[in-house]
Amino acid sequence: MECHIGVISGDGIGPEIVAEAKKVLDKAGEKYGHSFTYQDILMGGCSIDATGVPLTDEAIAAAKASDAVLMGSIGGNTQTSPWYKLAPELRPEAGLLKLRKSLNLFANLRPAYLYEELKEACPLRDDIIGDGFDMMIMRELTGGLYFGARKTEMVDGVITATDTLTYNENEIRRIAKRGFDIAMKRRKKVTSVDKANVLDSSRLWRKVVEEVAKDYPEVTYEHMLVDNCAMQLVKDPKQFDVILTENMFGDILSDEASMVTGSIGMLSSASLNDTKFGLYEPSGGSAPDIAGKGIANPIATILSAAMMLRYTFDLDKEADTIEAAVKQVLKDGYRTIDIMPQEDAKKAYVTQVGTSQMGDLICERI
Amino acid sequence: MECHIGVISGDGIGPEIVAEAKKVLDKAGEKYGHSFTYQDILMGGCSIDATGVPLTDEAIAAAKASDAVLMGSIGGNTQTSPWYKLAPELRPEAGLLKLRKSLNLFANLRPAYLYEELKEACPLRDDIIGDGFDMMIMRELTGGLYFGARKTEMVDGVITATDTLTYNENEIRRIAKRGFDIAMKRRKKVTSVDKANVLDSSRLWRKVVEEVAKDYPEVTYEHMLVDNCAMQLVKDPKQFDVILTENMFGDILSDEASMVTGSIGMLSSASLNDTKFGLYEPSGGSAPDIAGKGIANPIATILSAAMMLRYTFDLDKEADTIEAAVKQVLKDGYRTIDIMPQEDAKKAYVTQVGTSQMGDLICERI
Ligand SMILES: CC(C)[C@H](C(=O)O)[C@@H](O)C(=O)O
Ligand SMILES: CC(C)[C@H](C(=O)O)[C@@H](O)C(=O)O
């Protein structure tokens, strides 16, 4: 198979972690007879530096022309990087939001999975986490507060800023279906998260989810208020299979859930539209503090590449192979610094490795 | 001193836990020579049942006429209670939101504190939680998505729901000052939480917080994105002293932080305006599943009563006494079911008690 992949290396640790994912893809391609071609696409701070804007029309066109896009991470330190002195629509994140919207990537899948081998990196007690944790967040990605009208204006001499949270029934229906679809391939449970005791948009959310649920009699579903969900993710994270939620709640809850897995450096994501196209990126950020040091964990990006093989190219066996290689490398005791055990005694049983070495070790196991 | 207290017992476990707080107040009053008079005020589901609305004008007037209001909890199970079949503005929560707004209670203080004795109820690992956890969330309570315009309408034949998130600089300034003021009495650190990489309201928030910070040179402050904060609260909760944030983020983060303390049943809150008046309530909900069973934890309400003595009546010594009695009762091994240790071995060292017994045990220690 020929796969034409757009590559957004981005900023911070982005280029380092993307390089490892390409290495792993090439190794899998070699083994199974696929060829991956890569086209670099500029987005984020590096695009601002080169073109003055975080995402050019050419970049969008290049992304659209690819079968799928593999991304590293974009942006910098919001308090010290010069990019954050620019107008909001010229900052790195504006590029990512524009790309998500231009490509209609409304369905953001964020798996949160705790590897047996990394249990000691999980901040939760053993008896809470028990024999594992494996959930999926289905986050709506092109609506809500992220894309509503906003303005900052003087009202009676007082600076006033407004953002708007809008959802219509169609937007909710299509993401709800995705949530129930994926639950059917998993443990068949959906927790729809909203703030229906306050927000109109959440009340519509709940109503539409209930309608969609009727088409999935095999799936158990429940509604949960977002504040309670934030609590339950710490108290009893294993109760969840699929969390289905809107854009901003999904942003917050997926980062929270990521910690249960020990490190956000392990977590992949896929952003999908109604076609086979997808944008695949690690859940973590650009981590400017460790950029260039060769210590970032490339596993999230490598697993994102595996998701790409699975969802865009239907190469399930190849995706399985990459995921198995990641498991094996952990079993063999290799760890980047973010997933090192805390206690010295346990450190004796593992080997700390850098970004590139981790990529090599995974390739060796493919 | 004569203290005239409005009492909103509310729904679910509300009446049970409020009764214990009154017991404790009376005991403290006896000891120190204060008299507390109580006036019952209807709000929530019980008000709907009695009057058809969750909060009458008379109830608001009664609250305004009191020196302070002590509240239990309101509402029911949002999926099964008949109150949730009513129009949103007639539901129990609408009463609470109306009360907060009518009394201009813009500053919501939510302490999250882990008692040494309850470490084993905390879901986080020992080495993460270490020698304790003691933070304060300063949540803005009368602005943002909770009070913005909302509507549900047909747009081109499609049901569309909109909520509005608005803040003006004055609203942000007054809550920011409260945040820095309280930090001055604590460990002098403020973490202001926003989503400034997406929202206009958050960018204004950040700007105003920076202005206010200039008046507090002794306070170290930082900005943190809300998704990162949700992660840090699990990864390293001890880094926080005061979290300063807007209404919805504060709702989510305070519930998350509450879990770190083992049980939301331990957490008090105060909602203040620009006078000495305050509404004091436990952070937890009405817990309809355990209502009437006599097993709810009354400590959050008792500690809320202590906050009332401290903030409204300037009775610091009396508040200290109640807080010390709570500590002592935990030290003496008494636990309601929500704070029982998980492991059987540890259960041997504690005694499980009910709601009313817990109130009595605290009274005995005053
Ligand atoms: C960079 C930022 C705009 C983005 C978001 O909030 O969606 C990020 O936090 C994420 O979750 O992908
Ligand atoms: C009952 C509900 C409206 C309320 C809120 O969201 O503010 C509650 O969750 C709280 O945090 O006090």
Image: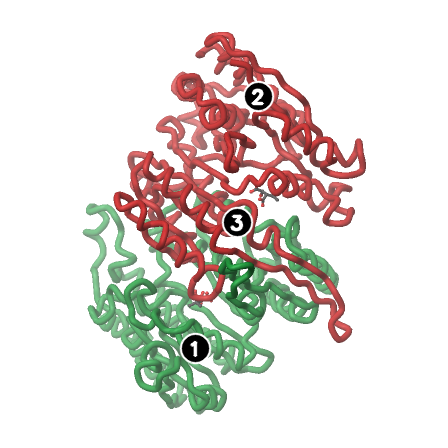
Chain colours: A red, B green
Q: Can you tell which of label 2 and label 1 is closer to the viewer? A: 1
Please tell me whether mark 1 sits on a helix, a strand or a loop: helix
Residue at (46, 79) in percent of width and height: B309
Instruction: In the rendered structure, find residue A355 and report the number of the disc placed on it.
Output: 2
- Work out how far the residue at label 1 is from the one at label 3, CA to CA, in angstroms: 28 Å
Relative to A242, residue A199 above or below: below
Label 2's element?
helix
Disc 2 vs disc 1: Cβ atoms closer than 8 Å? no
Labels 3, 2: one chain: yes
Three-letter amino acid code at disc 3? Asn
Disc 3 secondary structure class: helix
Which image quadrant: the N terminus of chain B?
Answer: bottom left
The circle drawn on residue B35 is none
Q: Based on the displayed image, in which of its 4 quarters is residue B19 positioned?
A: bottom left
Most foreground residue, B365 or A301: A301
The residue that disc 1 covers is B95
Q: Quadrant of residue A3?
A: top right
Residue B259 visible in image: no
First reached walking from the N terminus: tag 3 or tag 2: 3
- Residue A25: percent from the left, percent from the top? 53, 16
| Vertical order, A306 against A278 (above or below) | above
Q: Which label lies toward us, 1 or 3? A: 3
How far apart, in angstroms, are the residues tagged by discs 3 and 2?
31 Å
Taking B101 as reference, is A181 above or below it?
above
